[in-house]
Image: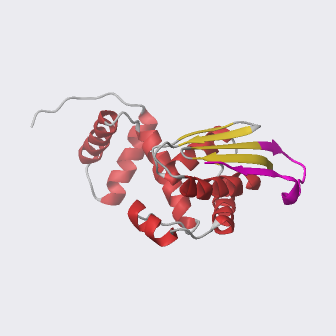
Amino acid sequence: MKRKFVAARADLVEKISELAKKSGRTMFSILNEALDAFIKAKEKNKDLYSVLEEVSIIEIARSAGMIFVPEVAYDSIIGNNNFEDYWKNSGQLFGKYLEINGFKELKDIEKAIKEIIGEDIDITISNNKIVCICPRLMESRLRDIASFLEGVITNFGFNVLGKEISKGIVVMRIKKGGNIARENRKETFSS
């Protein structure tokens, strides 16, 4: 096999040398593994840092007691039951785990939620609104997602002023701080 020399920062070479000694491997095998992983990530339009971040989010979710379930199984288990409080509590727990793991910025929270929901979802969180668009989901599933989002966002000091849910879209008006009684919130469910 032909070899080529590659230049690298000295501190990185030292760390790889230490890892090679500890694991009983060669630097050659570790570098080739790293380069192969880099190429595979790029072929999927990812970089290694985003892959590591996605794995971290999944680990946080598992630590929060979440499991991944096939969509068909989810739909048959949930049926027409109302699990709003369950989803809100799960969202609060996940939000707490995010906070403990250093997720503080809305963009970071938004990215973690996208990973966790696992649907082809478009979600935007700003200081006054959450917009969640997922055209293939029915209203009942979106109610669950809205309750989960409410739980996550309340963990970060936001109150939900109102929410509108219809097939494919959730819009939640939010506000940082203050204590707004639940009965004063306007909740609208439209089809």
Which residues are drawn in magenta? Answer: 174-191
The answer to whether residue 77 shows anywhere in this view is yes
Question: What residue is rendered at 90% in x and 49% in y?
Answer: 178
Residue 9 on image: x %, y % = 42, 31
Displayed quadrant of residue 36: top left
Please count the marks in the image: 0
- Of the pair 77 and 95, the residue shown nearer to us: 77
The x and y percentages for residue 142 are: 58, 53
* Furthest residue toward front: 191
Residue 171 placed where, x, y %? 67, 42
For residue 85, above or below residue 18: below
Compared with 12, 22 (above or below) is below
What is the image's colouring?
A: secondary structure
Instruction: Determine which quarter of the picture holds residue 144.
Output: bottom right
90, above or below 159, in the image: below
Position of 25 with respect to 19 (left or right) is left
In magenta stretch: residue 13: no
Q: Please state the horizontal and vertical placement of residue 1, each as a whole percent of the image.
A: 9, 37
Side of 102 relative to 157 (left or right): left
Q: Residue at x 24, y 29 (%)?
A: 5
Does residue 156 appear anywhere in the picture? Answer: no
Check residue 177 for magenta coloring: yes
